[in-house]
Each structure stands twice: as C-alpha cells, then as structure tokens.
Amino acid sequence: MSWGTELWDQFDNLDKHTQWGIDFLERYAKFVKERLDIEQNYAKQLRNLVKKYSPKRPKDEEPRFTSCLSFYSILNELNDYAGQREVVAEEMAHKVYGELMRYSQDLKAERKHHLQEGRKAQQYLDHCWKQMDNSKRKFERECKEAEKSQVTYERLDNDVNATKSEVEKAKNQYYLRTHMADESKNEYAAQLQNFNGEQWKHFNNAIPHIFKNLQGMDERRTVKLGETYRSFAEAERRVIPIVSKCLEGMVSAAKAVDERRDSTIVVESFKSGFDPPGDFPFEDFSQNLSRTGSDGTISNTPKGDRDRDGGPGSRPDPKHATSKTKNKLWLFGKKPKAPSLEDFSHLPPEQRRKRLQQRIDELSKELQKEMDQRDALNKMKDVYEKNPQMGDPNSLQPKISETICNMEKLRSEIHKNETWLSEVEGKQSSRGDRRHSADNHHHTPQGRESPEGSYTDDTSQEHHTPHHRSTPAKPGPPNPDPHEFDDEFDDDDPLPVIGHCKALYSFDGQNEGTLVMAEDEVLYIIEEDKGDGWTRARKQSGEEGYVPTSYVEITLEKNSKGS
C-alpha cells in the first residue's frame, strides 16, 4: 500500500513514525555495541586467565607429565578460543555497529530533506488559501457596500424632497459600488480557481511524491535492520567451526592423559641409579671381653694380637658407630647437600648421565654455530680475495682465528663431558652385572672363590671393573708374617672388628690371602693398613683376607683409630 494515497492527510504522524524508526535503529546499534564490548572483555579475561596459568619457566624445566602437557594444550586451545571471540567482536563492530551508525546518519539527512519539501508544499498551499480567502472576504465586503448604496439611491430617488444632485450623486455611488463588487467577484473567482488547482496538485502530486520517498526510506531502514540481524548471527556462526576445533582439541588433550607414562616419567626424573643398601654388618662388641674361669675356656688370642687390636680397653664406641652409619646410609635419613661440581659427580648416576648428555647437546649446538660462522667467514674471505674492492681479506683473519679457537675449546669441553658420560654409563653397566652376581651370591655366598683362592667355573659371577673409570693401582702382594697369619686363622676366636669399609671398586682377589669384593660391598675391618697398601677385612659370611686400601672407604671406630 502507498502512503501517498492512503495517508495523504497524515503528514504529522508520518513525521513521528520516521523519527521513531531512526530511534529504533540507533537503539539496536547501541545493543550491538554493548554486545561486542562484552565479547571483547570476555576475550581479554580469557587471555589474562591463560597468561596467569601458563608456565613461566623455560620449556626444558617444565614437567613432562602428560597431565601437565594436556593442561598446557587446553590453555593453548582456550587462547585460540579467546581469539575467536575477538573475531566475533571485530565482525560486529565493522559489519553491524559501524554500518548501522553510518546508515543512521544517512537516514536522518534524507528524512530531513523529505520533510522540508513537505513543509514547503504545505506552506505554499496555505499561501494560496489565504489569497483566496482574502479575495473572498473583499468580494463579500464590496457586495455589502453595493447593497447599501443601492438602498440609498432608491430611497433618494423615491423621495420628492431630494434634490436632483443628491439623487445623481447616490446613483453614481451605487454604480461605483456595483462595479467594485463585480471586480471583487472576478478576483475571488480567479483566486478560488487557483487555490483549487494548487490544492489538487498538492494532494495528488506533491504530497504523494514526498510520502512515497518517506515510505521508501522507511522500508530501506527495515531491510537494513534485517540485514544487520543476519550479519549479527553470521558473525557468531562463522567462528563455530574453529570454536568446535578448539573444543575438540581440549577433548583430545583430555584423552592424552596417560597415568602409566606419568609414572614412568617420575621414575626417569628421580631415579638415582644407586643400588639399595645391603644388610648392615653385625658388630660383636663382646669379642674384647676376657673369658672368665667359669666359662671353662681360655682366650686363644695371642697377647700381641690383643695389644695390636687395642686390648680390652679399646672397645668401639657404639654411639660413634651409629652416627657414622647414619651419615653414610643417607638413603634412610636426610641426604647430605653436596656442592655442585662441574662433572655433576654430586648427583646420582642416572641424573648425572642426563645432565651430562644435556650439556653435550648444548655444546654440540654451539660448536655447529661456530662451524657455520667459520664457513661463512671463509666464503667471505674468498670473495674479498677475488674482488679486493669489496673488502680486505686480512681484516677477517682475526675473527676466523677467534672462531677456530672457540671451536677447539668447545671440542675440548665436549670430549671432557663425553669422557664423564662414558664413565657413568660404564658404571651403570657394571652395576647391572653386580646385581646379577649378588643374586647368585645370595644362594652360594662362597661360590666365586674357594678358601684356597681357586676360581669356580661359574663365570656369570665374575665382577668386571668399569671400563671408563680408572681404578687405583693395586699394591704389591701382601706380605704378612706367616706365623701370625696362620695363628690368627687357626684361632677359635676371630679378630675383633675395629671398623667397617665400603668397596669403591670391585677386586678379584687373585693373589693368595686376598679377599674378593664387589663394588659397594660393606666389609668389617679387623686390621688397619700397616703401610704396605693392604687392609685386612672380613666378609659377612666370615671369610677374611686382605683388600687394597685404596679400593675401599674406611670408617674406623673412634677408640680403635691409631691402635
């Protein structure tokens, strides 16, 4: 339906309606603005949340647990999700809010123009009506004046007393008024005809045209609102595929959590590589007690041996022994804090191996950089030699020399660390062999060496010295006093324990009178080194013999030292 034909007399109402339409459009634009502000704030808060819970440490120091990695993946997906919320806000800002505000300004200008045209047409019609009304009033007045002059003329003409001049004057006045009335009538007729014509044009041409323009403007406003409604929804729907991928990524991260792998990582991270501590040796403090007559036995220990071993008065201090043990076996107590060393020897073997391997990788990368820089400098030098105008080749020599020096330093560092790494790996391999040997010794404690020092045929119990760790030089064969050796081994009472030791290296005990020991094995000390490099020890099985002093870490009881 057309506004021009149906609403020809509703100019004021159409004025109000078009103003309401623009106000509604701006209200919707304000709604979109608040919505995109919410999206922007939401995205900003999400990014701040991701930043707050993202790891602050370097990637190398971050835990490698699947639960942590999955959480970090979820943070990355959430960060991408926040980016999509920002995309929604930008789409709404440019394609909806910005478009609405520009269109609102155009609507206001267009509406103003159409309303001004309508008001001008209405003012012109009012002007025509006033002219017609004035001519009508004038015609009315002239007719009344003519009627009065006619009555006066007729009265004087019938009056016998009236003079001729008075009658003639009244007659002329009557004719004059009648002529003026006729002129007013003609003018009124012309103005009336003109007004009717302008009024027809106004309501059949001008107003329909203006209202048609207003109707088109209002319909375009409605269409624009529908388009922006669709754009508003499209801005949200356009990011749904990427948002779905973000959510799928979060679900995949949740499925990637592996409790068994995390447990394996815990083992790899904290594994020390040490063997569990063996049984602590029993220290018999009653050996130094004198046998009484009521026991019916007499001590067969020679006096010289008792004097050398400290005599009855050299009983070890149990409290001191306990404190020594507690300091040594730190696996059951507080681990002593060791200073950081260049070769990481203060770390457990497994951790030491990882740190050494990490340092070798870093040094290799630095070496590769230096090699690349050397090659680049040599190429530049060749270019300078072929084209002297480009530069002096001798100016590059100091830099090349410095690079070569750095390469040599790095190679030296790599070699040094590889040596330490080989030592650790050889150590761990040796420990694996010793574990197998220890299992066999558990069933046959003396299966490796007979009391006479001969080897058995069981080669699986052989103890191998680490290949990459140099052991101290063995001292010459022990030369104990033959009579003293025989007497002590023939005595019914064994020699008293004056301390204990821990084997730093394995010892095969091939010489007669020596004692076979495995690395980290704990032995009793029954006689100190007399200066020949050998210490007399006893195994938990009761087997006695000499071991190299440099192969063991000795802990003497307080009252036995220096005896």
Image (cartoon, rainbow, N blue to C red):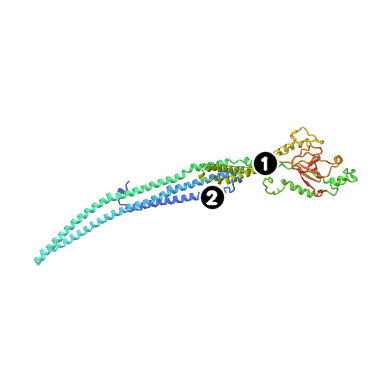
Is residue 388 something one can see in this rendering? yes
In the rendered structure, are the residues bearing label 1 and label 2 in contact, judged by CB atoms less than 8 Å apart? no
Residue 53: x and y in percent read 57, 48
Residue 551: x and y in percent read 76, 42
* Nearer mark to the viewer, of 1 and 2: 1
* Other-residue count near label 2 (Cα within 10 Å), few / some / many at <14 / 14–19 / ≥20: few
Amino acid found under the numbered disc labelled 2: Asn
* Other-residue count near label 1 (Cα within 10 Å), few / some / many at <14 / 14–19 / ≥20: some
Relative to 231, is 194 on the left or the right?
left
The residue under label 2 is 48
The residue under label 1 is 419
- For the residue labelled by badge 2, is the local secondary structure a helix, a strand or a loop? helix
For the residue pair 563 and 166, the one nearer the viewer reads as 563
- For the residue labelled by badge 1, is the local secondary structure a helix, a strand or a loop? helix
Compute the Cα span from label 1 to label 2.
48 Å
Residue 95: x and y in percent read 43, 47
Q: Earlier in the sequence, mark 1 or mark 2?
A: 2
